[in-house]
Amino acid sequence: MLLPVFTCQLSILEGFTQWSDNPTINNAISIDTNRQNSCRIVSDGIGGAIIAWDDYRNTATNSTDIYAQRVSGNGTLGLETGRSEEKISLPAGFTLNQNYPNPFITETRISFKLAMSGFVSLKVFNIEGKEVSTLVNEEMEPGSYTVMFDATGLPGGVYYYCLKTGDENDTRSMVLLK
């Protein structure tokens, strides 16, 4: 079952403000005097909710932190937790997306993202596993890329494209209509 996600500025439970910079308000989700943004609320599945938000209270490092708070169905608060965003790093490897459009008649776009520099190979193979095109075969920097595959002259059918970098590879299929 998918649980709804709500964006909030203020959350009201039985008439009491749950988000405030006034420490005299009972059960305030956050009483810090600096800015809180991007509040999200999701059901905890047992009648309460979990609230998470961006918090700018760490002015010493001028960074955004992420905080979360559980609220029971009767408004009782759990412990507030914080997680700093200062040491976020990109995952190793890459992401290969499905080509678009798929199926296609003559041309299609293949996009991918690289998290690290390295040698990259993107090749297209027919249903028999024979290489029909090399789209990329070079050193590349981290980033997002899109290449066009022109299938003019190839027969219709199922083709596979394979992205390789370092020790990782991913393959997806596409359909050429003729």
Image (cartoon, rainbow, N blue to C red):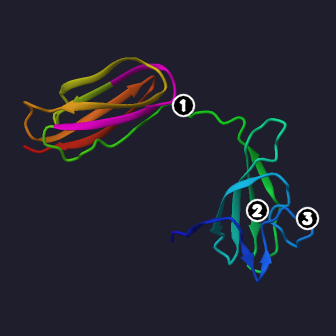
Few, some or many residues within 10 Å of mark 1 (<14, 14–19, 20+): few
- Where is residue 35 shown, x and y percent of the image? 77, 52
Residue at 51% from the left image edge and 69% from the top image edge? 2
Magenta segment includes 25: no
Q: Which numbered disc flags the more N-terminal residue, 2 or 1? A: 2
Q: Nearer the viewer, mark 1 or mark 3?
A: 3
Residue at 63% from the left image edge and 73% from the top image edge? 45
Q: In the structure shown, which secondary structural element does the residue marked by tag 3 occupy? A: loop
Residue pointed to by mark 2: 69
Q: Tell me: residue 23, above or below residue 86.
A: below
- The one nearer the camera, 144 or 125, is 144
Q: Tell me: residue 19, above or below residue 84.
A: below
Q: Which mark is residue 23?
A: 3
Few, some or many residues within 10 Å of mark 2 (<14, 14–19, 20+): some
Q: Image quadrant of residue 10?
A: bottom right
Q: Which numbered disc flags the more N-terminal residue, 3 or 2? A: 3
Residue ranking furthest to the top:
139
Residue pointed to by mark 1: 92
- Magenta: main secondary structure equals strand
Q: Amino acid at mark 1?
A: Ala
Q: Is residue 32 left or right of residue 120?
A: right
Which segment is the magenta one? 107-121
Q: Nearer the viewer, mark 2 or mark 1?
A: 2
- The one nearer the camera, 172 or 66, is 66
Few, some or many residues within 10 Å of mark 3 (<14, 14–19, 20+): few
- Where is residue 139 shown, x and y percent of the image? 41, 16
